[in-house]
Amino acid sequence: MCLNFSTLTFAQDGRYWSESYGNKSVLLNGAVNASVSDLGAVFYNPGRLGLIENPAFVVNARVYELSTLKIEDGINEGVDLKQSNITGAPSLAAGTFSLPFLKNHKFAYSFLTRQKTIADFLINVEDEGDLIDAIPGEELFNGTVNFNNTFKEEWIGLTWSLPISNKLSVGLSNFISNINKSSFINLDMNTLDEQNKVASLDMMRKFRYKSYGFLWKMGVAMNFSSVDLGLTITTPRINFNGTGSTHYGDYLVNIDSTGDGNTDDVYIHNIQSKVNANYKTPWAIGFGIGIHFKKGILHLSGEWYDKVPKYTILETVPFVGQSTGDTMYFAVVDELEAVINYGIGFEWNFNKRISAYASFAIDFSGVTSNITHFAEFKSEAANSVFQTDFFKTGGGISINSKKIDITLGLIYTGASQQMKRLINFPDNGNDPIFDSGNTSTLTFSSWRFVLGLSIPFAEKDE
């Protein structure tokens, strides 16, 4: 058996806390709804912008991620898939500005990568024996699965905040969202039987789409002597433009799939372009508290995300299979359950210059358990791939000087999931290729190495 497994970065399906923004907020795993102290406020709580005394231009911490994904019994019993990869993680650039005619109002601009994921692998298998029931005798067998899934979402934002008093501030962030998604899977299997006849099965699905939309995040922040409070509301995404395409292909040659003694050759091919694309996100309500101690702050945050009922992202028109005459269709759908994410972080200030951070957060997946996976080659494909929940822990230090703030840290993310083995390469004549009833175990881990710089606009006190 020959096996080749290439680059894979775990997809962030249905997760909302997969990324953190703002250098100190990264070390606190985003548990800063009430107590964010850097320009991560444009994302976490725009109300906090009005209470930050010395905002800085921030280039989000440069993050390098070493990720490892392992799928035990990935395509057969005892055949594991494993890959490690080093990539750069999503980033944020943000700064503040003012308007002379609105003296008490504060403004900020931001450019952030909300999600950036790549899943790309190629599996080749060769074997020999009586592997396929529909072909008498023994055969030479080779099979290939080629899978690619890329998703990138970028936000461009403007944030406004008004401090009503030195203890209360409100704010609003308006984001333009740009989404690019593409998925491709090809299953190619070929055999040579004892009569020197060749049989082939080739199945392919492909879709891609772009979508542009608006969303808003409203925030309220309150500061008291020893407690900070925060509340945010995020609106669903409103699409204003979206288009995509689909490619569907099934080909079967020289195989008696029905057992009637005749081969059942199949040729089905369909390409559709300029398909309307519609991408939805849920309502969200965030809440947080920051408890001040003599030498530090305890950060607590949670966020509820509403469910997204099943809807169609790409809906093609029905088409007729060329060889079968059957009416068929191929649609890309999505559906998300309601989830509550939460996190805790601790900040310890050794002095005015040096602080240490530690944090833990849970990022639940909203992906439902009954999705139709893309790799099942059915007429309906889910936009999401995995249902795995993330558990994140980490920490680091920040060093503050008069001219620059330096952030150093390390974040670990782990996940594990039992899942149905979607494709089962033949290793005997009894197991079907699909719906085999067998399972695989997916485990994921990543280490993120953090280096961030913030440049204050005003000089700090000695």
Image (tube, helix red, strand yellow):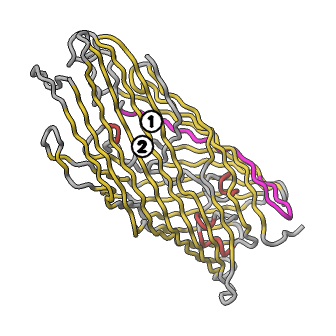
**Callout 1–callout 2 Cβ contact below 8 Å:** yes
Specify the quadrant of the image occupied by residue 299: bottom right
Q: Which one is earlier in the sequence, the residue at label 1 or at label 2?
A: 2
Q: Which residue is mark 1?
A: 417
Question: Compared to 143, does 14 lie above or below?
Answer: below
Tag 1: residue type? Gln
Determine the main secondary structure of the stretch shown in magenta: strand
Circle 2 crowding by C-alpha within 10 Å: few under 14, some 14–19, many from 20: many
Question: Compared to 131, does 155 lie above or below?
Answer: below
**Extreme-left residue of the structure:** 260
**Residue at screen point 18% across, 43% down:** 321
Circle 1 crowding by C-alpha within 10 Å: few under 14, some 14–19, many from 20: some
Between residues 79 and 221, which one lies in front from this camera angle? 79
Specify the quadrant of the image occupied by residue 38: bottom right
- In magenta stretch: residue 333: no
The quarter of the rendered structure image containing the N terminus is top left
- x and y percent of residue 158 in the render? 58, 73
Specify the quadrant of the image occupied by residue 137: top left
Q: Which residue is mark 2?
A: 387
The quarter of the rendered structure image containing the C terminus is bottom right
Q: In this picture, which residue range is highlighted in magenta?
A: 398-420
**Residue at screen point 32% across, 25% down:** 189
Tag 2: residue type? Gln
Per the model, the C-alpha gap separating discs 1 and 2 is 8 Å
- x and y percent of residue 138 in the render? 27, 10
SS for callout 1: strand
Relative to residue 43, is residue 282 drawn left or right?
A: left
Relative to residue 221, is residue 426 drawn left or right?
A: left
Q: Which mark is residue 105?
A: none
